[in-house]
Amino acid sequence: MASLDRVKVLVLGDSGVGKSSLVHLLCQNQVLGNPSWTVGCSVDVRVHDYKEGTPEEKTYYIELWDVGGSVGSASSVKSTRAVFYNSVNGIILVHDLTNKKSSQNLYRWSLEALNRDLAPTGVLVTNGDYDREQFADNQIPLLVIGTKLDQIHETKRHEVLTRIAFLAEDFNAEEINLDCTNPRYLAAGSSNAVKLSRFFDKVVEKRYFLRESNQIAGFPDRKRFGGGTFKSLHYD
């Protein structure tokens, strides 16, 4: 059997948000029974049918790189993580729906991956906002995934999901909110499964069909990032 072409997707987010459980669910379609802390980076592979059901359909390997650690780590730890950020074709940003700080930190994770060769000064401005110019010329596909939906009471879900809806808008990405202990959230034909497939199609297209913008180029250029700053935290 001929080897398949592959793409590399980073899975970024704070420790404890459920990245390992998510990657296991995406690649094995099974719940991870005994999740443990990721040291360094763990890689798993998902088989994806690009443009499934069309004449252009082709199968690819999606390498999911689950990067461990904390966004607030010492510079030496960040330098060690930087080796995982080479030749990236897409990024999945993962946050815990019950942890506001993990949502805020998605901006810092993104900047760490996309600006790994830049000095940290200048990334944050003094009032805690983020500089839009950091994102201006980036083109990498992004997907935002919120975990632990099962831990939010149904009467509070609308409030929480409304509060974090700005994340997808800021990153110009689709969002998926789920419970990693329930495979039905990614069942074939569900809206989440469609979003996931659409994201992986974009990653493949950037890597193999849009040569001028492949690999780690970053966030799509949007008028929203035209200048000035935007708030990293929208909570009351």
Image (cartoon, grey):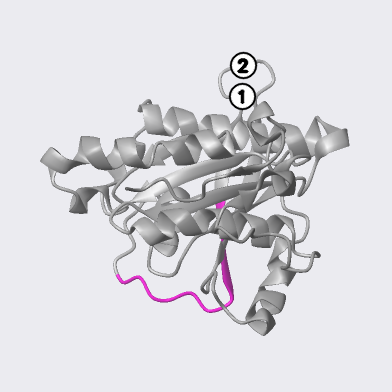
Quick check: is 50 in the magenta stretch? no
Q: Which mark is residue 54?
A: 2
Q: Is residue 192 above or below residue 116?
A: above
126 relative position to 82: left or right: left
Q: Residue 67 at x, y = what percent? A: 57, 67
Q: Residue 172 at x, y = what percent? A: 58, 33
In the image, farthest residue toward the right = 212
Magenta segment range?
Answer: 34-45
- Residue at image position (42%, 60%) is 102
Q: Secondary structure at mark 2?
A: loop
Marks 1 and 2: CB-CB under 8 Å?
yes
Q: Nearer the viewer, residue 203 or 33?
A: 203
Q: Nearer the viewer, residue 59 or 85?
A: 85
- Residue at image position (79%, 40%) is 137
Q: Nearer the viewer, residue 49 or 23?
A: 23
68 relative position to 29: left or right: right
